[in-house]
Image (spheres, rainbow, N blue to C red):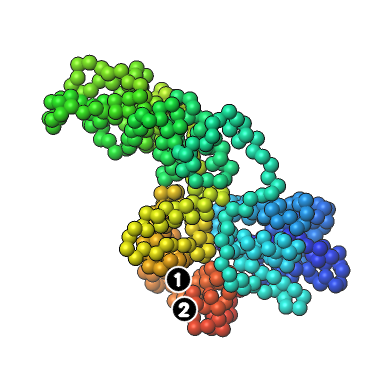
Amino acid sequence: MKQAALFAWIGIADLKASRGVSSAGAGPICQAAKKLSFTNLYLLSDHPRADAEAYRSWLSKQAASEIKIIPAKLSSPTCHAEIYEHAIKAIETVKKAHKHEALSLTYHLSPGTPAMASIWLLIGKTIHPARIIESSAQQGVQVVDFPFELSADYLPSITKTEDDELIRLTLGLPPVAPEFDAIIHRCDAMKRLVAKARRLALHDVPVLLLGESGTGKELFARAIHTTGKRNGKPFIAVNCGAIPQELFESEFFGHEKGAFTGAVQARAGYIEQADCGTLFLDEVGELLKAAQVKLLRALQDGIVQRVGASKPLKIDIRVIAATNCDLVQDVADGNFREDLFHRLAVGVLQIPPLRERKGDLSLLIEHVLEKINQKKSEHPGWKHKKISAGAKNIMLQHPWQGNIRELINTLSRAAIWVPGEIIQAEDIKEALFSAGRATPQNDCILNRPLGEGFCLSELIAEVSKHYLKRAIEEAKGNKTLAAKLTGLPNYQTFINWMNKHKVSF
């Protein structure tokens, strides 16, 4: 069952209504709760706890919805930064609790201060899309038709204090190197991560980078290498998952001429090529157990011997390894050697996925698009690309399972396909791939078995309700736009369909 949630701040008019003040009427929240169907009411309150609880008790007798009071202490009822933080926290907490359920959001503009209304409007048109309503005694409850596109995923808080951990990490560090400047970020999590990486760069110890595919592990590895004492020495990157078991020794340790069939000349292996520099072992978790043993021995002894050679070679390398696997679990399962894990995991950095880097996505979109424009500027007829607010909103709401790599590829496709200067929302939708997102079986309406239990009229009504509800949600309550989305000629026809199939909004 789809959950319908209303978010609102409790206003003075609401409290007066609960106390029986006739001029307040039912109050904006109660008016909306009676008019529209909500399974849950999430009410933020800056009022004394006793007042908020008294209001909840009164409202529970007026509306059938489940009511939750969310205390939200403000230094001022017009402090936009604090209002934003409390609203975002409330929405994200509720969405997390309902992550396995369909959840329809509505924000109420009328209760509370104008500052509260402006924040609901900003959130509802950007990072957490929702239907937006307002109400009055004269006009009743209405869906707000806001015809402008907004885009925002980062609003810095003027109330935030200094990050003590970040200050501690950066004490004694030299100025930021250009290599770390290439890691585009502004969120606190990434600031702390970069500070840790800069500190590790000064110490010639092995580093293990953990993170999902496409999060920028090699970018961190190169920054650590070029900022450390081995700068100017070789940086050899190896994809461990791409080397067949039978070629491991030849690829990592090298071989002499004639050592085996096809060895027409001597070749230095990856470890020898990295001598005095850094060996970057990408996807180290893909190494088979036999290869792990041989690699561990070479790293412990600091010696390699080419296949077919009679004498070993002394080597001096720094190892930076990376994986998207859970190496700790792999060690527990016996799939990765514990001694090799401890050899690699001296300095460990966990790189967060893009979806957890709050505030970074908009910055990365602009940076990547500028890089694409610079690269393509020499192409005849190329027009400098910009991205619309609507297109950016689509990107801000996307989960980015492929992280930064997926972001770069998506923007590249969109920029190439668009002949003009502006990348619109539809262009981004076409450029996004939905790999791995299978359509639920219960959404299929074709090829259902005929006979007992099958009713064509009920099936048609089910499909109509489904798409009517989707249209009104995607159109944020704008009936004209909803009619266009469903291919109906005008908003009056759309309303007739809604009445026919008993769909409310």
The quarter in which the N terminus is drawn is bottom right
Q: Are marks 1 and 2 in contact (CB under 8 Å)?
A: no
Counting residues from the start of the chain, the first of labels 1 and 2 encountered is: 1
How much space separates mark 1 and mark 2, taking CA atoms? Answer: 31 Å
Which quarter of the picture shows residue 79?
A: bottom right
The spot of residue 391 in percent (x, y) is 49, 63
Which quarter of the picture shows residue 115?
A: bottom right
- Whether residue 302 appears in this view of the structure is yes
Write down the residue under mark 2: 487
Residue at x 66%, y 69% (from the top left corner): 133
Vertical relation: 42 (above or below) 242? below
Instruction: Give the crowd class for mark 2: few <14, some 14-19, many >=20 residues within 10 Å.
Output: few
Write down the residue under mark 1: 453
Residue at x 34%, y 35% (from the top left corner): 237
The spot of residue 304 in percent (x, y) is 28, 21
Amino acid type at image mark 1 = Gly
- Is 43 on the left or on the right of 327, as rendered? right
Per the image, label 2 sits on a secondary structure element best described as: loop
- Is 182 on the left or on the right of 478, as rendered? left
Residue at x 24%, y 27% (from the top left corner): 268
- Is 275 on the left or on the right of 397, as rendered? left
Disc marking residue 52: none
Per the image, label 1 sits on a secondary structure element best described as: loop
The spot of residue 324 in percent (x, y) is 42, 39
